[in-house]
Image (tube, rainbow, N blue to C red):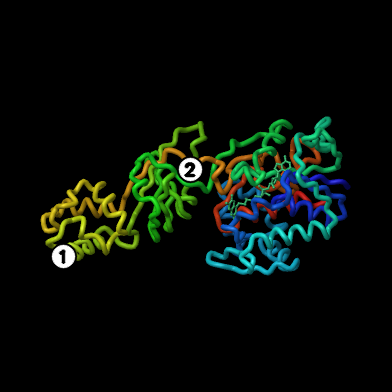
Amino acid sequence: MKVIVIGGGAAGSMAAINAAGSGADVTLIEKNEKIGKKIYITGKGRCNVTNSSDADVFFKNVNRNSKFLYSSFYNFDNFSVMRFFEDHGCPLKEERGNRVFPVSDHSSDIIKTLTNVLKESGVKILFNTCVKDLIVEEGVVKGVILSDEKKLFSDRVIVATGGVSYPMTGSDGDGYRFAKETGHDLKEPEASLIPIIPKEDFYKELQGLSLKNVKLTLFDNNKKIYEEMGEMMFAHFGLTGPLILTVSTKMTFKDRSKPHEYKLLLDLKPALSKEMLDERLLKDFGKNINKAFKNSLDELLPKNLIPVIIELSGIDPMKQVNEITREERREFVELMKNVSFTPVALRPISEAIITKGGVSVKDINPSTMESKKIKNLYFAGEVIDVDAMTGGFNLQIAWSTGFLAGTI
Ligand SMILES: Cc1cc2nc3c(=O)[nH]c(=O)nc-3n(C[C@H](O)[C@H](O)[C@H](O)COP(=O)(O)OP(=O)(O)OC[C@H]3O[C@@H](n4cnc5c(N)ncnc54)[C@H](O)[C@@H]3O)c2cc1C
Protein backbone atom coordinates (compact mmCIF):
# COMPACT_ATOMS: atom_id res chain seq x y z
CA MET A 1 0.00 0.00 0.00
CA LYS A 2 1.27 3.48 -0.91
CA VAL A 3 0.73 6.20 1.68
CA ILE A 4 1.40 9.93 1.36
CA VAL A 5 1.62 11.96 4.57
CA ILE A 6 1.43 15.75 4.22
CA GLY A 7 3.30 17.49 7.04
CA GLY A 8 6.30 16.42 9.07
CA GLY A 9 5.14 17.67 12.44
CA ALA A 10 4.28 15.49 15.43
CA ALA A 11 1.12 14.00 13.89
CA GLY A 12 2.54 13.43 10.40
CA SER A 13 5.78 11.88 11.65
CA MET A 14 3.92 9.47 13.93
CA ALA A 15 1.46 8.58 11.15
CA ALA A 16 4.32 7.88 8.72
CA ILE A 17 6.23 5.76 11.28
CA ASN A 18 3.18 3.65 12.11
CA ALA A 19 2.17 3.11 8.48
CA ALA A 20 5.73 2.17 7.47
CA GLY A 21 5.92 -0.17 10.47
CA SER A 22 2.95 -2.06 9.00
CA GLY A 23 4.74 -2.50 5.71
CA ALA A 24 3.32 0.45 3.74
CA ASP A 25 5.40 2.33 1.20
CA VAL A 26 5.32 5.77 2.85
CA THR A 27 6.26 9.20 1.48
CA LEU A 28 6.29 12.07 3.98
CA ILE A 29 6.08 15.51 2.36
CA GLU A 30 7.35 18.47 4.36
CA LYS A 31 7.56 22.01 3.06
CA ASN A 32 10.47 22.90 5.37
CA GLU A 33 14.05 21.72 5.10
CA LYS A 34 13.58 19.53 8.18
CA ILE A 35 10.82 17.92 10.22
CA GLY A 36 9.40 19.22 13.49
CA LYS A 37 10.01 22.97 13.31
CA LYS A 38 7.11 23.54 15.69
CA ILE A 39 8.20 20.72 18.01
CA TYR A 40 11.50 22.57 18.32
CA ILE A 41 9.84 25.58 19.99
CA THR A 42 7.48 23.58 22.24
CA GLY A 43 7.79 23.77 26.00
CA LYS A 44 10.16 26.76 25.67
CA GLY A 45 12.58 24.57 23.74
CA ARG A 46 12.26 21.63 26.15
CA CYS A 47 9.19 19.96 24.55
CA ASN A 48 6.50 18.94 26.99
CA VAL A 49 5.99 15.78 24.97
CA THR A 50 2.97 14.41 26.86
CA ASN A 51 1.43 14.18 30.32
CA SER A 52 1.63 11.08 32.52
CA SER A 53 -1.73 11.61 34.25
CA ASP A 54 -4.61 9.15 33.95
CA ALA A 55 -6.85 9.11 30.90
CA ASP A 56 -9.62 11.09 32.63
CA VAL A 57 -7.19 13.98 33.20
CA PHE A 58 -6.30 13.96 29.51
CA PHE A 59 -9.96 14.14 28.49
CA LYS A 60 -10.68 16.87 31.08
CA ASN A 61 -7.89 18.93 29.55
CA VAL A 62 -9.25 18.67 26.02
CA ASN A 63 -11.26 21.83 25.39
CA ARG A 64 -13.27 20.72 22.40
CA ASN A 65 -14.60 17.42 21.10
CA SER A 66 -12.88 15.24 23.68
CA LYS A 67 -15.18 12.27 22.89
CA PHE A 68 -13.92 12.30 19.32
CA LEU A 69 -10.49 11.40 20.72
CA TYR A 70 -11.51 8.27 22.68
CA SER A 71 -10.45 5.71 20.04
CA SER A 72 -7.24 7.43 19.06
CA PHE A 73 -6.19 8.04 22.67
CA TYR A 74 -6.91 4.50 23.89
CA ASN A 75 -5.21 3.10 20.79
CA PHE A 76 -1.98 5.03 21.43
CA ASP A 77 -2.12 6.71 24.82
CA ASN A 78 0.34 8.82 26.81
CA PHE A 79 2.13 5.73 28.14
CA SER A 80 2.53 4.40 24.60
CA VAL A 81 4.06 7.74 23.64
CA MET A 82 6.47 7.60 26.58
CA ARG A 83 7.40 4.00 25.71
CA PHE A 84 7.93 4.97 22.08
CA PHE A 85 10.49 7.66 22.90
CA GLU A 86 12.25 5.73 25.66
CA ASP A 87 12.47 2.54 23.54
CA HIS A 88 14.03 4.58 20.77
CA GLY A 89 16.76 6.06 22.91
CA CYS A 90 15.17 9.27 24.25
CA PRO A 91 14.83 9.02 28.05
CA LEU A 92 12.04 11.10 29.58
CA LYS A 93 11.32 12.65 32.98
CA GLU A 94 8.22 13.88 34.76
CA GLU A 95 7.83 17.31 36.26
CA ARG A 96 5.17 19.29 38.16
CA GLY A 97 1.65 18.50 36.97
CA ASN A 98 2.86 15.20 35.43
CA ARG A 99 4.34 17.07 32.49
CA VAL A 100 6.77 14.84 30.60
CA PHE A 101 9.98 16.20 29.04
CA PRO A 102 13.12 14.65 27.56
CA VAL A 103 15.73 14.18 30.32
CA SER A 104 18.11 16.31 28.24
CA ASP A 105 15.64 19.26 28.33
CA HIS A 106 16.17 19.58 24.56
CA SER A 107 13.22 19.41 22.16
CA SER A 108 15.82 18.64 19.49
CA ASP A 109 16.16 15.16 21.03
CA ILE A 110 12.49 14.47 20.34
CA ILE A 111 13.00 15.56 16.72
CA LYS A 112 16.20 13.51 16.45
CA THR A 113 14.36 10.42 17.70
CA LEU A 114 11.55 10.89 15.20
CA THR A 115 14.06 11.48 12.39
CA ASN A 116 15.96 8.29 13.26
CA VAL A 117 12.83 6.16 13.47
CA LEU A 118 11.49 7.58 10.20
CA LYS A 119 14.78 6.62 8.55
CA GLU A 120 14.89 3.14 10.14
CA SER A 121 11.28 2.50 9.06
CA GLY A 122 12.14 3.30 5.45
CA VAL A 123 9.92 6.38 5.16
CA LYS A 124 10.87 8.45 2.13
CA ILE A 125 10.93 12.15 3.12
CA LEU A 126 10.58 14.92 0.57
CA PHE A 127 11.89 18.09 2.23
CA ASN A 128 11.37 21.59 0.82
CA THR A 129 8.33 20.21 -0.94
CA CYS A 130 4.93 21.80 -0.69
CA VAL A 131 1.64 20.09 -1.47
CA LYS A 132 -0.58 22.43 -3.44
CA ASP A 133 -3.69 20.33 -3.89
CA LEU A 134 -5.25 16.95 -3.37
CA ILE A 135 -6.17 14.78 -6.35
CA VAL A 136 -9.72 13.58 -5.81
CA GLU A 137 -11.71 11.54 -8.33
CA GLU A 138 -15.32 10.53 -7.73
CA GLY A 139 -15.10 10.90 -3.98
CA VAL A 140 -11.80 9.05 -3.63
CA VAL A 141 -8.41 10.68 -2.99
CA LYS A 142 -5.79 9.48 -5.46
CA GLY A 143 -2.75 11.53 -4.50
CA VAL A 144 -1.41 15.06 -4.34
CA ILE A 145 -0.22 17.85 -6.63
CA LEU A 146 3.00 19.54 -5.55
CA SER A 147 3.66 23.26 -5.96
CA ASP A 148 5.82 22.49 -9.04
CA GLU A 149 2.71 20.80 -10.53
CA LYS A 150 4.24 17.33 -10.20
CA LYS A 151 1.65 14.67 -9.30
CA LEU A 152 2.23 11.90 -6.78
CA PHE A 153 -0.25 9.03 -6.49
CA SER A 154 -1.07 6.85 -3.50
CA ASP A 155 -3.72 4.62 -1.93
CA ARG A 156 -4.02 6.81 1.17
CA VAL A 157 -3.34 10.49 1.87
CA ILE A 158 -2.96 11.71 5.45
CA VAL A 159 -3.32 15.46 5.99
CA ALA A 160 -1.24 16.46 9.05
CA THR A 161 -0.55 20.09 8.17
CA GLY A 162 -1.21 21.59 11.64
CA GLY A 163 -3.11 24.79 12.44
CA VAL A 164 -2.26 28.40 11.65
CA SER A 165 -0.42 29.55 14.75
CA TYR A 166 3.30 30.34 14.49
CA PRO A 167 3.11 30.15 10.66
CA MET A 168 6.86 30.53 10.29
CA THR A 169 7.11 26.92 11.48
CA GLY A 170 5.32 25.88 8.29
CA SER A 171 1.81 25.44 9.68
CA ASP A 172 -0.01 28.10 7.71
CA GLY A 173 -3.41 26.63 7.04
CA ASP A 174 -2.96 24.64 3.81
CA GLY A 175 -4.78 21.68 5.34
CA TYR A 176 -7.86 23.80 5.99
CA ARG A 177 -7.94 24.71 2.30
CA PHE A 178 -7.54 21.04 1.24
CA ALA A 179 -10.40 20.11 3.56
CA LYS A 180 -12.67 22.91 2.41
CA GLU A 181 -12.03 22.37 -1.28
CA THR A 182 -12.94 18.70 -0.90
CA GLY A 183 -16.26 19.45 0.81
CA HIS A 184 -15.44 19.24 4.51
CA ASP A 185 -17.01 21.52 7.07
CA LEU A 186 -14.46 23.85 8.64
CA LYS A 187 -14.89 25.34 12.12
CA GLU A 188 -13.45 28.82 11.88
CA PRO A 189 -9.85 28.82 13.15
CA GLU A 190 -9.30 31.00 16.19
CA ALA A 191 -6.44 31.67 18.58
CA SER A 192 -6.31 29.64 21.77
CA LEU A 193 -3.79 29.64 24.63
CA ILE A 194 -3.12 33.26 23.78
CA PRO A 195 -2.63 36.58 25.62
CA ILE A 196 -5.74 38.70 26.19
CA ILE A 197 -6.12 42.40 25.34
CA PRO A 198 -8.25 44.32 27.86
CA LYS A 199 -10.07 47.61 27.26
CA GLU A 200 -8.55 49.29 30.33
CA ASP A 201 -5.06 50.48 29.48
CA PHE A 202 -3.62 50.65 32.99
CA TYR A 203 -2.11 47.20 32.28
CA LYS A 204 0.55 49.02 30.22
CA GLU A 205 1.86 50.69 33.38
CA LEU A 206 2.34 47.25 34.91
CA GLN A 207 4.51 45.90 32.08
CA GLY A 208 6.86 43.20 33.35
CA LEU A 209 4.95 42.57 36.59
CA SER A 210 4.28 38.92 37.37
CA LEU A 211 1.66 37.94 39.96
CA LYS A 212 1.78 34.50 41.56
CA ASN A 213 -1.09 32.76 43.39
CA VAL A 214 -3.80 35.08 42.15
CA LYS A 215 -7.32 34.08 41.12
CA LEU A 216 -9.07 34.99 37.89
CA THR A 217 -12.80 34.68 37.38
CA LEU A 218 -14.22 34.99 33.89
CA PHE A 219 -17.79 36.16 33.32
CA ASP A 220 -19.70 36.08 30.04
CA ASN A 221 -22.80 38.27 30.01
CA ASN A 222 -22.54 38.46 33.83
CA LYS A 223 -22.52 34.67 34.17
CA LYS A 224 -19.48 33.10 35.78
CA ILE A 225 -17.96 30.67 33.29
CA TYR A 226 -14.50 29.93 34.66
CA GLU A 227 -12.38 30.40 37.76
CA GLU A 228 -8.78 29.42 38.32
CA MET A 229 -5.75 30.21 40.47
CA GLY A 230 -2.24 30.65 39.15
CA GLU A 231 0.31 33.02 37.75
CA MET A 232 -0.28 35.91 35.36
CA MET A 233 1.84 38.64 33.86
CA PHE A 234 1.41 42.09 32.40
CA ALA A 235 3.04 42.90 29.05
CA HIS A 236 3.03 45.88 26.72
CA PHE A 237 0.64 43.96 24.43
CA GLY A 238 -1.83 42.82 27.10
CA LEU A 239 -2.31 40.20 29.81
CA THR A 240 -0.32 37.00 29.60
CA GLY A 241 1.18 34.16 31.68
CA PRO A 242 -0.07 30.60 32.26
CA LEU A 243 -3.32 31.61 33.97
CA ILE A 244 -4.28 34.04 31.21
CA LEU A 245 -3.48 31.49 28.48
CA THR A 246 -5.75 29.00 30.22
CA VAL A 247 -8.56 31.55 30.57
CA SER A 248 -8.23 32.46 26.88
CA THR A 249 -9.34 28.95 25.90
CA LYS A 250 -12.77 29.76 27.36
CA MET A 251 -13.24 32.86 25.21
CA THR A 252 -14.26 33.43 21.61
CA PHE A 253 -14.66 36.53 19.55
CA LYS A 254 -15.73 34.65 16.45
CA ASP A 255 -18.96 33.05 17.61
CA ARG A 256 -21.57 35.02 15.73
CA SER A 257 -24.45 32.91 17.01
CA LYS A 258 -24.58 34.94 20.24
CA PRO A 259 -22.92 38.13 21.51
CA HIS A 260 -20.31 37.64 24.21
CA GLU A 261 -19.53 40.26 26.79
CA TYR A 262 -16.57 39.21 28.87
CA LYS A 263 -15.42 40.49 32.22
CA LEU A 264 -12.34 39.27 34.05
CA LEU A 265 -12.01 39.76 37.79
CA LEU A 266 -8.60 39.49 39.38
CA ASP A 267 -8.41 38.56 43.06
CA LEU A 268 -4.99 39.71 44.26
CA LYS A 269 -5.37 37.95 47.61
CA PRO A 270 -7.43 34.79 47.08
CA ALA A 271 -6.11 33.16 50.27
CA LEU A 272 -7.68 35.92 52.39
CA SER A 273 -11.40 36.54 52.87
CA LYS A 274 -12.52 40.18 52.74
CA GLU A 275 -12.64 40.25 56.55
CA MET A 276 -9.13 38.82 56.82
CA LEU A 277 -7.82 41.24 54.22
CA ASP A 278 -9.44 44.15 56.05
CA GLU A 279 -7.74 43.05 59.28
CA ARG A 280 -4.44 42.74 57.46
CA LEU A 281 -4.86 46.23 56.00
CA LEU A 282 -5.68 47.63 59.44
CA LYS A 283 -2.51 46.04 60.81
CA ASP A 284 -0.41 47.58 58.03
CA PHE A 285 -2.12 50.95 58.55
CA GLY A 286 -1.31 50.65 62.26
CA LYS A 287 2.38 50.34 61.44
CA ASN A 288 2.25 53.35 59.10
CA ILE A 289 -0.25 55.53 60.92
CA ASN A 290 1.47 58.86 60.16
CA LYS A 291 2.49 58.05 56.61
CA ALA A 292 0.83 58.88 53.30
CA PHE A 293 -1.49 56.13 52.00
CA LYS A 294 0.87 55.40 49.09
CA ASN A 295 3.62 54.51 51.55
CA SER A 296 1.57 52.10 53.63
CA LEU A 297 1.13 49.17 51.24
CA ASP A 298 4.69 47.94 50.68
CA GLU A 299 4.18 44.69 52.58
CA LEU A 300 0.85 43.92 50.96
CA LEU A 301 1.36 44.57 47.25
CA PRO A 302 4.19 44.54 44.68
CA LYS A 303 5.86 47.93 44.42
CA ASN A 304 4.80 48.88 40.87
CA LEU A 305 1.22 47.74 41.46
CA ILE A 306 0.73 50.21 44.33
CA PRO A 307 0.34 53.50 42.36
CA VAL A 308 -1.94 51.80 39.83
CA ILE A 309 -4.24 50.24 42.40
CA ILE A 310 -4.37 53.47 44.39
CA GLU A 311 -5.39 55.33 41.26
CA LEU A 312 -8.12 52.76 40.61
CA SER A 313 -9.34 53.21 44.18
CA GLY A 314 -9.78 56.97 43.78
CA ILE A 315 -8.20 57.56 47.20
CA ASP A 316 -5.71 60.44 47.33
CA PRO A 317 -2.27 58.76 47.47
CA MET A 318 -1.03 61.56 49.77
CA LYS A 319 -3.87 61.12 52.24
CA GLN A 320 -2.59 60.34 55.74
CA VAL A 321 -3.29 56.72 56.67
CA ASN A 322 -5.02 57.83 59.89
CA GLU A 323 -7.47 59.87 57.82
CA ILE A 324 -8.65 56.98 55.65
CA THR A 325 -12.25 56.22 56.46
CA ARG A 326 -13.65 52.80 57.19
CA GLU A 327 -15.71 53.06 53.99
CA GLU A 328 -12.60 53.86 51.91
CA ARG A 329 -10.78 50.91 53.47
CA ARG A 330 -13.71 48.61 52.78
CA GLU A 331 -13.81 49.72 49.14
CA PHE A 332 -10.06 49.23 48.85
CA VAL A 333 -10.42 45.65 50.11
CA GLU A 334 -13.20 45.13 47.58
CA LEU A 335 -10.91 46.42 44.82
CA MET A 336 -8.02 44.13 45.79
CA LYS A 337 -10.41 41.17 45.58
CA ASN A 338 -11.93 42.36 42.27
CA VAL A 339 -9.63 44.21 39.90
CA SER A 340 -11.76 44.34 36.79
CA PHE A 341 -10.70 43.92 33.16
CA THR A 342 -12.86 43.95 30.07
CA PRO A 343 -11.33 41.61 27.48
CA VAL A 344 -11.95 43.07 24.03
CA ALA A 345 -9.72 40.85 21.88
CA LEU A 346 -7.19 38.06 21.85
CA ARG A 347 -3.73 38.58 20.40
CA PRO A 348 -3.42 37.52 16.73
CA ILE A 349 -3.72 33.84 15.91
CA SER A 350 -0.16 33.80 14.57
CA GLU A 351 0.98 34.20 18.19
CA ALA A 352 -1.26 31.48 19.62
CA ILE A 353 0.13 28.29 21.15
CA ILE A 354 -2.70 26.43 19.51
CA THR A 355 -5.38 26.90 16.87
CA LYS A 356 -8.93 26.27 18.02
CA GLY A 357 -11.24 25.17 15.18
CA GLY A 358 -10.33 23.30 12.02
CA VAL A 359 -11.76 20.32 10.14
CA SER A 360 -15.08 19.42 11.75
CA VAL A 361 -15.00 16.18 13.73
CA LYS A 362 -18.41 15.40 12.23
CA ASP A 363 -16.66 14.80 8.90
CA ILE A 364 -14.04 12.40 10.31
CA ASN A 365 -14.49 8.81 11.50
CA PRO A 366 -13.08 8.82 15.07
CA SER A 367 -12.17 5.10 14.91
CA THR A 368 -9.88 5.55 11.90
CA MET A 369 -9.38 9.30 11.26
CA GLU A 370 -10.66 8.72 7.72
CA SER A 371 -12.78 11.43 6.15
CA LYS A 372 -16.47 10.64 5.92
CA LYS A 373 -16.62 12.70 2.71
CA ILE A 374 -13.60 11.46 0.73
CA LYS A 375 -12.48 7.85 0.73
CA ASN A 376 -8.85 7.10 1.65
CA LEU A 377 -8.31 10.65 2.91
CA TYR A 378 -7.27 10.91 6.57
CA PHE A 379 -6.70 13.81 8.96
CA ALA A 380 -4.42 13.98 12.03
CA GLY A 381 -3.25 16.54 14.59
CA GLU A 382 -4.03 20.20 15.01
CA VAL A 383 -5.71 20.49 11.59
CA ILE A 384 -8.74 18.81 13.23
CA ASP A 385 -11.18 20.80 15.41
CA VAL A 386 -9.70 19.58 18.71
CA ASP A 387 -7.53 21.51 21.15
CA ALA A 388 -6.41 21.18 24.73
CA MET A 389 -4.86 23.00 27.67
CA THR A 390 -1.10 23.27 28.20
CA GLY A 391 0.60 20.35 29.92
CA GLY A 392 1.58 18.09 27.00
CA PHE A 393 -2.03 17.41 25.98
CA ASN A 394 -1.84 19.06 22.55
CA LEU A 395 1.14 17.00 21.46
CA GLN A 396 -0.62 13.92 22.84
CA ILE A 397 -3.53 14.69 20.51
CA ALA A 398 -1.06 14.85 17.61
CA TRP A 399 0.67 11.57 18.55
CA SER A 400 -2.62 9.70 19.11
CA THR A 401 -4.47 10.91 16.01
CA GLY A 402 -1.31 10.56 13.90
CA PHE A 403 -0.77 6.97 15.04
CA LEU A 404 -4.39 6.05 14.29
CA ALA A 405 -4.38 7.73 10.85
CA GLY A 406 -1.26 5.71 10.03
CA THR A 407 -2.77 2.39 11.12
CA ILE A 408 -3.03 0.13 8.09
C1 LIG B 1 5.26 28.16 21.18
C2 LIG B 1 4.53 26.85 21.27
C3 LIG B 1 4.80 25.98 22.33
C4 LIG B 1 4.11 24.78 22.44
N1 LIG B 1 4.43 23.94 23.46
C5 LIG B 1 3.78 22.75 23.57
C6 LIG B 1 4.17 21.81 24.56
O1 LIG B 1 5.18 21.98 25.27
N2 LIG B 1 3.42 20.66 24.67
C7 LIG B 1 2.36 20.40 23.85
O2 LIG B 1 1.71 19.38 24.02
N3 LIG B 1 2.02 21.25 22.86
C8 LIG B 1 2.71 22.40 22.68
N4 LIG B 1 2.38 23.24 21.65
C9 LIG B 1 1.35 22.81 20.68
C10 LIG B 1 1.95 21.74 19.73
O3 LIG B 1 3.18 22.20 19.25
C11 LIG B 1 1.02 21.47 18.55
O4 LIG B 1 -0.24 21.14 19.02
C12 LIG B 1 1.55 20.31 17.70
O5 LIG B 1 2.87 20.56 17.28
C13 LIG B 1 0.67 20.07 16.48
O6 LIG B 1 1.25 19.06 15.69
P1 LIG B 1 0.81 18.80 14.20
O7 LIG B 1 1.70 17.71 13.70
O8 LIG B 1 -0.65 18.64 14.11
O9 LIG B 1 1.14 20.14 13.42
P2 LIG B 1 2.53 20.91 13.19
O10 LIG B 1 3.51 20.57 14.24
O11 LIG B 1 2.17 22.31 13.00
O12 LIG B 1 3.09 20.28 11.84
C14 LIG B 1 2.53 20.54 10.58
C15 LIG B 1 3.61 20.36 9.52
O13 LIG B 1 3.00 20.39 8.23
C16 LIG B 1 3.85 21.08 7.33
N5 LIG B 1 3.02 21.56 6.23
C17 LIG B 1 1.96 22.42 6.32
N6 LIG B 1 1.41 22.61 5.10
C18 LIG B 1 2.14 21.84 4.23
C19 LIG B 1 2.07 21.62 2.82
N7 LIG B 1 1.14 22.22 2.07
N8 LIG B 1 2.98 20.81 2.24
C20 LIG B 1 3.95 20.21 2.98
N9 LIG B 1 4.07 20.38 4.33
C21 LIG B 1 3.17 21.18 4.93
C22 LIG B 1 4.43 22.19 8.19
O14 LIG B 1 5.62 22.71 7.65
C23 LIG B 1 4.63 21.49 9.53
O15 LIG B 1 5.92 20.95 9.65
C24 LIG B 1 3.10 24.43 21.49
C25 LIG B 1 2.86 25.28 20.43
C26 LIG B 1 3.57 26.47 20.30
C27 LIG B 1 3.29 27.36 19.12
| Circle 2 or circle 1, nearest the eye | 1
Q: Name the mark on residue 17.
A: none
Lower position in the chain sequence, tag 2 or tag 1: 2
Sort mark 1 into few (<14), some (14-19) or many (20+) by Cα contacts within 10 Å: few
Q: Name the mark on residue 251.
A: 2
Identify which residue is drawn at 82% across, 35% down: 140
Q: Position of residue 221 (x, y in %)?
A: 39, 38
Per the image, label 1 sits on a secondary structure element best described as: helix
- The amino acid marked with disc number 1 is Gly
Q: Is 118 displayed left or right of 213 in the figure?
A: right
Mark 2 and 1 residues: CB-CB less than 8 Å, in contact?
no
Q: Position of residue 344 (x, y in %)?
A: 42, 38
Per the image, label 2 sits on a secondary structure element best described as: loop
C-alpha span from label 2 to label 1: 43 Å
Q: Is 390 displayed left or right of 291 in the figure?
A: right
Q: Is residue 58 visible?
A: no
- The amino acid marked with disc number 2 is Met
Q: Which residue is mark 1?
A: 286
Q: Position of residue 195 (x, y in %)?
A: 47, 47
Q: In front: 217, or 99?
A: 99
Q: In front: 397, or 206?
A: 206
Q: Is residue 276 visible?
A: yes
